[in-house]
Image (cartoon, rainbow, N blue to C red):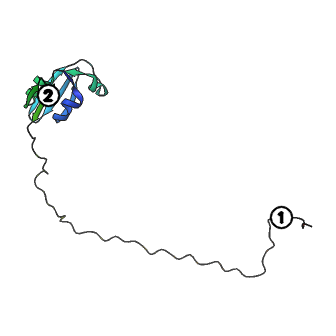
Amino acid sequence: MAPIAPFITHCSDSISYEGKKIVIRRGARVVRLLTGVIEPRTLPAYYVAVAPLFRRLDASVGYDATRRVLFVRCAPSAPIRTPEPFQPRPQVAPTTIFTPEPVVTPRPIVTGSPYPRRTPIVVSPPRA
């Protein structure tokens, strides 16, 4: 007996739910476990008999009783490939991007006599 997560999730391609069943897929193999209503966050606490489950998922299982170790060997799944047809280079010519030159803001020209200062200047008495 072992929890579904991380043991079964490591060897499976996908795990989904169909009502009160957990559906575990690996390649063309599909295993359905009647579990009742279960939430994904409780998978580490849900224990199942893993040896028959691994065998149904086409994995070889061995157990060393002296060391209390379970050996699971999953056959490698098919490599992920891009769908056909695949063309590595784009066939469309790149479009020209038009960016206008930024307009330079003119500096203000100040003429005439300056206005008096409107903020008061704090004057402290001289120290003796």
Image location of residue 36, percent across then percent down:
24, 17
Which residue is located at x 19 percent, y 35 percent? 10
Per the image, the residue denoted by label 2 is: 70
- Which of the image's four quarters has the N terminus? top left
- Please provide percent x and percent y for residue 11: 16, 34
Q: Is residue 14 left or right of residue 28?
A: right
- In this rendering, position of residue 59 left or right of residue 116: left
Of helix, strand and loop, which one carries label 1? loop
Label 1, residues with CA under 10 Å away: few <14, some 14-19, many ≥20: few
Q: Which residue is tagged 1?
A: 122
Residue type at mark 1? Val
Q: In this view, does 118 lie to the left or right of 86?
A: right
Asked which secondary structure carries label 2, the reply is strand
Q: Which mark is residue 81?
A: none
Between the C-alphas of marks 1 and 2, the distance is 85 Å
Type of amino acid at the residue the image marks with label 2: Leu
Q: Determine whether 38 is above or below 81 in the image.
A: above
Q: Which of 76 and 126 is in front in this view?
A: 126
Which residue does the image show at 12% across and 34% down from the upper left?
26
Residue 115: x %, y % from top left = 79, 74
Which residue is rendered at x = 58% and y = 78% of the image? 106
Closer-to-camera residue (11/86)? 11
- Residue 92 spot, x, y in % from top left: 20, 66
Q: Is residue 96 among the parts visible in the rendering? A: yes
Residue positioned most to the bottom:
111
Image quarter for residue 77? top left
**Farthest right residue in view:** 128
Residue 15 in sight from this viewpoint = no
Q: Going 22% across and 21% down the picture, which residue do you hit?
A: 47
